[in-house]
Amino acid sequence: MWWPLRSAAGAALVCAGLVLVAVWGWVRGGDHSKLTHFFINVTIVVALQSFSGNSGILSFGHMALFGTGAYVAGILTLDPALKATYLTSLPHFLQSWNPHWWIALALAAAAGGALALLSGIPILRLDGASAVIAILALLLIADVVFGAWTGVTRGGAGLIGLPPEATMSRALVFALAAVVVARVFKDSKTGLLLRASREDAFSAASVGVAVRAYRVRAWVLSGVIAGAAGALFGWWIGTISPTDFFLAPTFALIVMFIVGGKRTVAGAVVGAALVTLIQEQVRQYEDSSVHLGVLTIHRLTGLTQLVLVLMILLVMYARPEGIVGREEPDETILRFVRGRAA
Amino acid sequence: MPVRNDLGARTGPRVLLEVRGLTARYGPVVAVRDVDLRVGEGEIVALLGANGAGKTTTLMSIVGLHRARTGTIELDGHEIGHLPPERVVRRGVGLAPEGRRIFAGLTVAENLRLGAAGAGRARDDGRRERLLELFPALRERLRLPAASLSGGEQQQLAIARALMSGPRLLLLDEPTLGLAPKLVRLVFDLIARLRDEEGVTILLVEQNVHQALRSCDRAYLMRVGGIEAEGTPEELRRDRRVQAAYLGVPE
Amino acid sequence: MTLHEFVQQCINGLSLGSTYALLALGLAMLFSIMGLINFAHGELLTIGGYVMWTLLHHDVSWALVVPATLLATTLAAVAMERIAFRPLRGASIETLLVTSFALAFFIQTVLQIGVSAEPEPIAHTGWSDRGYSVGPYTIGLIQIITTAVTFAVLVALVVFLRRTLLGVSIRAAAEDFAVVRLMGIPAGRVVVAAFALSGLLAGIASLLFFASAGSVSPTSGTAPVVAAFIAVVLGGLGNLAGAVVGGYVLGFADQILAAVHSSTILQFHDAVVLAILIGLLLLRPQGLVGRSRGLA
């Protein structure tokens, strides 16, 4: 079989799982908001996986790409009346233009890819820990821009009233597409070579020019997926401000990535499922107070964060490879079947 | 079938180091397989073999720097296999590692000072003086960064540093690698003097088979992770496999 | 910009750079020895801030606040090593990185739940606002203290690293940890010493930082520590002298650009500084001082 088809077929197992979750949602009826959130989380963590999982460079900067997508799509699809009041520095043609959601999403993905290309060419010339820190610097730069460019982003006050374009089925489609693309990329020549180079990606040893080019490719692909995911996120949550794309969500994203298993696309999906579950279930207790004998804690702000911390530490100490491990589940099954046959 | 000699019966020295059934891995790869080794007190023993035969891994296992291994390692009758390297060193083992691995950014004096850190009770302030007499080149360069030394001087520093803790057993990993012939002779002279004058027992890893057989009391020949032959230099020179592989004598 | 403004900004940059240098030194030390990029280093700064807040709030004198803060950050750093990092010895650099990131969030969240997410005011001392005029320039007392203390600390650190066995061991460990153990020096002792030292340096930075910052919040440490990260990379990863140089370059760049920027760009000040530093790094990927080892 032609290899991209074989890879896509390998991703079918994960895709089937995602579709099952959506079917369960439709059958059960009611509000699909939590499942939509899950599919968006799947998309962004798969974006991270396609860069960090292959290159071995842990990115703390994906929220910059994700946020860019969210702001681009959000600004484009905001009600023109609101634009005129909020976004005073917006160019005129953007003030009046109100594109269809998929055009906005495509532009958001393109913006994510463009930012990745622009930042990746310089940053990915660095190796190992230097690259990690430079990517972190990108997150900081993005945070400053989101916060300070008030005429376009409305700064810390946040962009309010984004249209609810992120339905569950749309989020599902993009999650499925992301999973397939990431898997095909992982098995492609670029992906294979990147993974071969990752063993010493952290060492300061100089890396060949070719590897740098592969890293940039992975980073740009990752940026495109992250941009699309960001667009959906903005429409899903309705209001975006710089803190939605800074350190706390970066941490949640890293937890999804690591807990599931950073080397596999399936691991990314498992991580997204676990973290979404925690985010949605624990959040309701965040405003409650706790009485511990004499001590009373009034608000459990950050309880989600605490649970995520405990979860990732548990994985770090007990199973650093993550829940899924080194192999995609279809690879494990195939190996098992072949072992039986032999 | 390896040539085996009963060390105790012939030479009679007390056994200082005894390795039994040592197997060491790097992940799934077995680098050393079921190696038995003995070094008697006051002996110079050479561990010979080609690249990748497992010589360095054997030394690293003895000092506790290579942890993925099974088998027993006894120093003077006490098991040391479970100890971390710093404790092994404090029991009286010194290693001048492969590639010297001196601290290039530190001065020669600082390198020697660190070498004495593991002396524990055997601390001896006169030792540096005696070592500087053995290695006069180092005395002139005490205040200079170790990186500025020549290859031969760096090797001398590595050996001197390992001796600063006053070890009973000195492990030398390829001490002559990359040295000019004149310096090779100097290093072997030093090894002989260390044993004769300081009473240090020496286990020496070498690729330079001719030179090593000239200087040692006994030798082991390693091949692909196992001991292939063992004996005195005369015995090994007569061994057909050794002749074929290392001494250039056709089989 | 006039020469006068330039000199004034350099004076300001000197004290800002001092804080960065102190933080960067601690980070560089841990990185060089164990490959750890310690995200939780900023939380040491924050912990110092909260200790100051608590004590000053209860009118404890500065003569006690100073040693108490230093002790708290040093112990916190040692506790971090003992609880979080020691069980991971031998783990991959990525595992250490993620663990330190999680640890940073853990401390922030505990402070958020235990104290408050809101900033707490740190009582301004009378002296921290005092300033002197030297010719056309104004120099704040806190700037003088910051710079002088940092220089004194740097001298003391060099003496420690050159004269004591533990200091020499730390420098050697930065080159080759395994061989340090072959010298009979326990690995644990060197690592704990490096953590303690990084905690002490963070404590000094904490005192200088919060004496003028005016308030402390659970996320106070984030921005300075990220700046210190940049300083470490800029100076040459893991190079202690480089970390100091990187810290001061960052401090000067920050202050000089602040004076140049027009008010519209000023909002983007931090982004511009970071972008320029990344640009600098591209010209010299090995850092300004290079990756040469130790503090030679």
Image: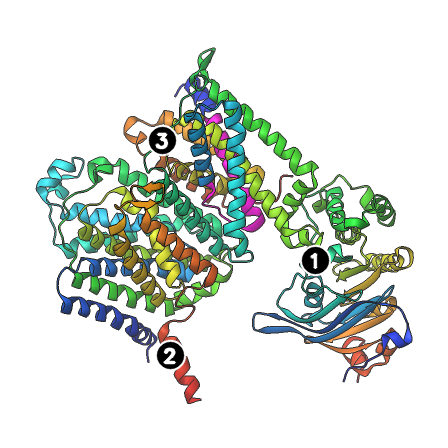
Q: Residues within 10 Å of mark 1 (few under 14, many from 20)?
A: some
Q: Is residue C40 magenta?
A: yes
Q: Nearer the viewer, residue A196 or A70?
A: A70
- Label 1 marks which chain's residue? B
Secondary structure of residue under mark 1: loop
Left or right of residue B41, residue A63 in this image? left
Q: Which residue is mark 2?
A: A333
Q: Are marks 1 and 2 in contact (CB under 8 Å)?
A: no
Q: Mark 3 and 1 residues: CB-CB less than 8 Å, in contact?
A: no
Q: Which residue is mark 3?
A: C120
Identity, as a three-letter code, of the amino acid under mark 2: Ile
In this rendering, position of residue C80 left or right of residue A297 = right
Q: Nearer the viewer, mark 3 or mark 1?
A: 3
- What's under tag 1, amino acid-wise? Gly
Residue B99 numbered tag: 1
Locate the C terminus of chain C and report the quarter of the image it occupies: top right
| Distance from the alpha carbon under mark 1 to that under mark 2 | 45 Å
